[in-house]
Image (tube, helix red, strand yellow):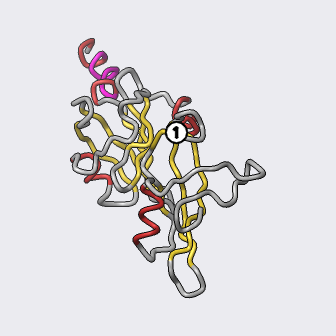
Amino acid sequence: MNERGDITLDSGFLPARAGNFSDRDYFRFHRDSANTGLYISKPYASRLRDGALTIALSRRIAHPDGSFGGVVVGTLSVDYFRALLDGLSVGQRGTAAVIETNGAMITRLPYDPKVVGRDIQNAPVFIQAMSTNEGAFMGTASIDGIRRLYVYKHLPGLPIIVDVAPAESDVYAEWRRRALRL
C-alpha cells in the first residue's frame, strides 16, 4: 500500500485489486510511528475476503529520506488459528487461546465469534501471562468466570501468546472420584 493506503501491488491479482485501507489499525500504526518492526493487527472483518475474520502482519515502508512510504501487509485468517486449536483436548470446561500481547483475543477454543477481537488487556489472567515468557498458574477467566490451570507461552519473535487451560474441576475430577471411593 502506498502512503495514502491504496493497494499498489497485490500478490494474488494482476492488476492489483482496488482498495484503500488507510482506516485500518495496521496502516495508522505505521503511518504515525517510525517503528519499522512487525505489527500484528487486531482481528477485523476483511473487505477483500467477504468479511472473513482476519489479522494483518505488517511492516512500514520508508522513503529514502525516512518519511512514510506505505505498508507491506500479509494476512492470516482467524480460521487458521482455529484449526491449530481444534485438535486440542482441553476437557469439558477447558479452553485454549491465541492472544496478542496487546490484549486482543485472536481466537479461543471453544470457538465463539463474539470473543474474537475482544480486549482482555485488563484481565488478571492476561496480566499474569504477560509477567513472564512462559509458565503455569491457576486463575479465573474474565470471559466466563471459570477457574482454570493456565499453561502459556509467548511465541518467540512474535507478539502472540498461546495458552491451554483445562478447568480446575476437570483437572481434579478423577482425583476426587478416587478420594470419595477411598
Where is residue 23 drawn, in percent x and y? 43, 54
Magenta stretch prevailing secondary structure: helix
Q: Is residue 13 above or below residue 5?
A: above
Determine whether the residue tagged by mark 1 lies in a helix, strand or loop. Answer: helix
Query: Residue drawn 75% across and 48% down?
Result: 13
Which residue extends farthest bottom?
65
Query: Residue drawn 41% across and 52% down?
Result: 100
Where is residue 53 drawn, in percent x and y? 50, 37
Within-10-Å neighbours for mark 1: few <14, some 14–19, many 20+: many
Amino acid carrying label 1: it is: Val
Q: Is residue 58 magenta?
A: no
* Count of numbered tags: 1
Where is residue 8 drawn, in percent x and y? 66, 60
Query: Residue drawn 26% across and 36% down?
Result: 141
Instruction: Name the image quarter holding the N terminus.
Output: bottom right
Q: Is residue 159 above or below residue 80?
A: below
Nearest the viewer among 127 and 60 is: 60
Name the residue tied to disc 1.
Answer: 78
Q: Is residue 151 left or right of residue 63?
A: left
Q: Is residue 174 magenta?
A: yes
Nearest the viewer among 180 and 38 is: 38
Query: Residue drawn 51% across and 54% down?
Result: 21
Instruction: Name the image quarter holding the C terminus.
Output: top left
Which residue extends farthest right?
14
Q: Is residue 35 above or below residue 177?
A: below
Where is residue 105 drawn, in percent x and y? 38, 43
Magenta residues (range): 171-177
